[in-house]
């Protein structure tokens, strides 16, 4: 007694021995395309705009870091920024931690 009927066993060895079935490969391609447009592409676009914002930062801009620290840029170096968070209180943060620029005057309304 065999678990595989003889008709199926004979059909698979003769019919598909040397052939590649493109239809079975199509779902994998569709999944990759969906993965690209739903996950990879938006992430790359967001990273590109963030890097552009980091390169356009200037002394005097008011920014908020990814940890929520609000301050005014007092000096920009290659990888670090000196951020004035209160009167005569300056901290050093990594440039990549800057989350967004805020409109001028936001810091005056809150702290300074």
Image (tube, rainbow, N blue to C red):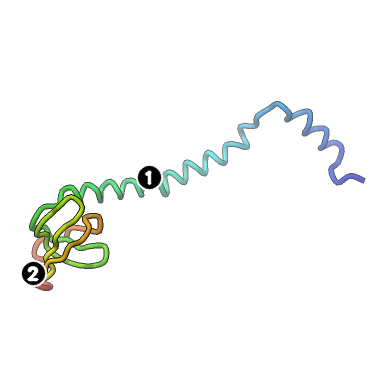
Disc 2 is placed on an element classified as helix
Residue at image point 11% right, 52% down: 58
Residue located beneath label 2 in the image: 108
Q: What mark, if any, has residue 24 been given in the picture? A: none
- What kind of element bears circle 1? helix
Mark 2: give few (<14), some (14-19) or many (20+) Cα within 10 Å.
few
Residue 76 image position (x, y, % from top left):
13, 54
Residue 68 coordinates in the image, percent (x, y): 24, 67
* As drawn, 47 above or below 86: above
Mark positioned earlier in the residue sequence (1 or 2): 1
Residue carrying label 1: 41
Relative placement, left or right, of 72 versus 97 is left
Q: In which quadrant is the C terminus drawn?
A: bottom left
**Is residue 21 found left or right of 7 in the rendered image?**
left
- What is the tally of numbered marks visible in this picture? 2
Q: How many residues crowd mark 1 within 10 Å: few (<14), some (14–19), many (20+)?
A: few
**Splitting the image into 4 quarters, where does residue 103 fall?**
bottom left
What is the quadrant of residue 91 in the picture? Answer: bottom left
Q: Residue at x 36, y 48 (%)?
A: 42
Residue appearing at x 17%, y 66% in the figure: 70
Q: Position of residue 7 (x, y in %)?
A: 85, 36
Give the answer, above or below, for where 102 lies relative to 52.
below
Q: Nearer the viewer, residue 96 or 29?
A: 96
Q: In the rendered image, which quarter is residue 69 located in? A: bottom left
Q: Is residue 45 left or right of residue 15?
A: left
Most foreground residue, 21 or 50: 50
Would you place residue 75 above or below residue 56 in this image? below
């Amino acid at each position: 007694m065999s678990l595989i009927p003889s008709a199926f066993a004979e059909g698979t060895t003769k019919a598909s021995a040397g052939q590649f079935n493109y239809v079975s490969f199509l779902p994998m391609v569709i999944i990759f395309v969906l993965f690209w447009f739903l996950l990879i592409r938006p992430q790359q676009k967001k990273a590109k705009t963030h890097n552009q914002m980091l390169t356009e930062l200037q002394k005097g801009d008011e920014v908020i870091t990814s940890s929520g620290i609000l301050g005014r840029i007092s000096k920009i170096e290659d990888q670090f920024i000196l951020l004035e968070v209160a009167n005569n209180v300056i901290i050093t943060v990594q440039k990549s931690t800057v989350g967004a620029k805020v409109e001028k005057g936001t810091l005056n309304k809150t702290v300074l």
